[in-house]
Image: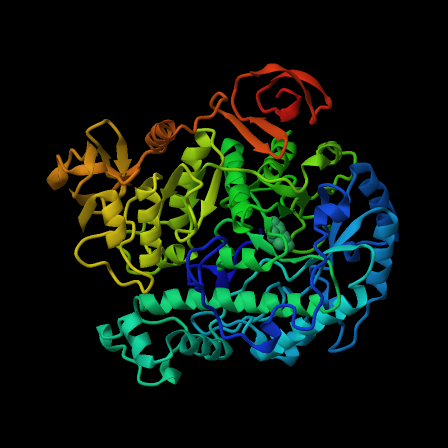
Amino acid sequence: MHTPGTLTVSLPRLRRGGRGHGAVGSSRGLPLRSNDMIGAGGRATSGRGLADRLGGLAFGGDYNPEQWDEEVWAEDDELMRRARVNLATVGVFSWALLEPEEGRYEFGWLDEHLDRLHANGVAVDLATPTASPPPWFTLAHPDALPVTPDGARLTHGSRDTYCLAAPAYRAAARGIADALARRYGDHPAVALWHVHNEYATLCWCDHTAEAFRGWLRHKYRALHALNDAWGTAFWSQRYHDWDQIMPPRATQWHHNPGQTLDFRRFFSDLALQAYRDQRNAIRAHSDRPVTTNLMLPGYQNLDLWAFGREVDVVAVDHYPAAPGVDAAADTAFGGDRARSFGGGRPWLLMEQGTNTVYAGDRTLAKEPGEILRHSLSHIAHGSDGALFFQWRQSKAGAETWHSAMVPHAGPDSRIFREVTELGAVVDRLREVAGSTVTAQVAVLHDADAWWALNVESMPSSALDYHTTLKRAHRALWDAGVVTDFAHPEHELDRYRLVVAPALFLLSDAGAENLRRYVEGGGTLLVQHFAGAVDERLHARLGGYPAPALREALGIRVEELRPLRRDEKITLSDGTRAAEWSESVQLAGAEAVASYTHGMLAGRPALTRHRFGAGHGWYLSTVPDPEDHTALVHRLLAEVGVVSAWPPGVEAVTRGRLLFLLNHGADTVPLPRPAHDLVTDRVVADVPPGGCAVLRTDEGA
Ligand code: GLA
């Protein structure tokens, strides 16, 4: 993960169309130009997935041989064999070398590396280098450089200095993707295409403004519909001409929330359109699968459901944000999301760090064994491999201190030894490639709800979407349960429990879908401040949440009462809580716990409603993590989803393999000794910090 720059801070991202796999409704998006049409004249992918091409799981990472010389390349070959590397991502930041001046390509050096890797048994994930346009490009096309909300045009000298709406950038990106695909589309080394790198830089320039207006015209058709949606009657914002509309640039105080949300929707669509440009250019010359590496969890401005539908395999980069058990929980969170964005298909961990934990103002090192544990967690949660950024640690440049598979210290190092051990384990696990994971519980995620909660002018700054989402997932992870993510409009019937955190924005269709889910026998836990606005960010009138959800929950929220900073409250059942409270009226539900403070004393805080064949629960405050987990435990017990393993053991069944990761402090005995694919011997227990992978059909 690189540090988000000026353009990636607090402002919006955009899009809509918002549904993922199995959605119950229709979608809409940007007006499509002809090159957006999938497969127009191009080849379809042959259906041979990556695992098929590799004959197992992928192991390796970003490989940047252009930073080194022949002597090092020879050592790379030897070390890659030793570590059993079978996939190298090449060319991610090579544009300035591949196209040293406009239209003049130098492919000779890349030919040599691809041939060398192929001869060494290493397949290539060939990248298009469009995340980092070369200096000549930005000097020739200064209008393709990104502009910040306050009007500063950035310059080259870093990376990701592009504007996705600039015609010159889009043409150049298509051009280099096309040139690479023509040359390497059939190269025997190429097993996967890696479009761009971690979309996307935001921009507020004039090109963006024009594209934004085009997107809005397509969405709203008539200006009065936009004025109505954005509530422009407030603060004299009425637009009388489309050309009066701007991206949400720096302004005096709060931006119009509708404008902010639509900008995010627009930008996600724009990024997807840019991805499609390149993917289609590649497909015209290659039958290999195409993907782009998505960044999880909260950095990107993308609707990941939409991207999940467009890539041949979901690929994500994952760097934990905290050490220890929090990193393990975060890894599971990332894995469960990646799997879900691909509709349950196997996905690919494109990047992780061998020795990198991004902990705020410093990068922490990993503990011995964590490279293995984190990689096994990704594979358990559905990844068809474990890849790293990067193979060899750079000796110069902005990421000199970012960890790698071969560190500065060289192969005689703890890191390379652990990498080599991991390579052998990944090889032994090859039978799991292509198999899937089944979850009985889901957490709802919707980019619209995320972006909506990020607009300015909310009643509390403590309403952070990802904190709430992660907390909900963490409670389930702590309870030892594997969790899917789902969109509120997805088919949910296969889940015994659905948790809806931070679902501030909820469409009528989403609310109706949740109502039907409960009525049909599902158990739904909805957390505070849910369904308070519709997809236009208009407040629900007559009480929150959306009417269909009120019906399922048997409640009506009359008043929001954010708590003071640092204020702690205790509910009638002893639950400790903070941040938020609401005045909840019962409309069929029973109060399970009540408030004990202030004007809310004696009023419901946690409610339960028997509705149809199911139950709708509403939690109107934010419990402490421990009490939150206890509540989730209770619900899981009610729906009969209970882990067979002691607390601290993460147990995931994928295909015929059972992955056991012991995050606890005690040795965990197995019901009977079994052959462990990690150690390749029969084991009777899993020690603290240890892992085992057992075949379920061998009695595990
Ligand atoms: C991201 C990028 C890589 C690198 C790593 C470092 O994931 O894709 O290029 O910057 O971060 O963490």
- Residue 632 showing in the rendered view: yes
Whether residue 622 sits left or right of residue 388 in the image: it is left
Rendering coords of residue 373 (x, y %) = 61, 32
317, above or below 216, in the image:
above
- Residue 358 showing in the rendered view: no
The answer to which image quadrant residue 633 occupies is: top left
Instruction: Indicate the colouring scheme.
Output: rainbow
The answer to which image quadrant residue 320 occupies is: top right
Whether residue 143 sits left or right of residue 81 in the image: it is left
In terms of depth relative to the viewer, which is nearer, 185 or 398?
185
In terms of depth relative to the viewer, which is nearer, 132 or 600?
600
Which residue corresponds to the image point at 38% horizontal and 50% vertical from the top-left? 465
Whether residue 415 sits left or right of residue 209 in the image: it is right
In terms of depth relative to the viewer, which is nearer, 395 or 93?
93
Q: How many numbered marks are there?
A: 0
Rendering coords of residue 689 (x, y %) = 58, 24
Identify the image quadrant of the C terminus.
top right
Residue at the extreme left of the image, as rendered: 599
Which residue corresponds to the image point at 56% horizontal and 79% vertical from the top-left? 143
62, above or below 610, in the image:
below
Which residue corresponds to the image point at 29% horizontal and 76% vertical from the top-left? 227
Rendering coords of residue 5 (x, y %) = 52, 60
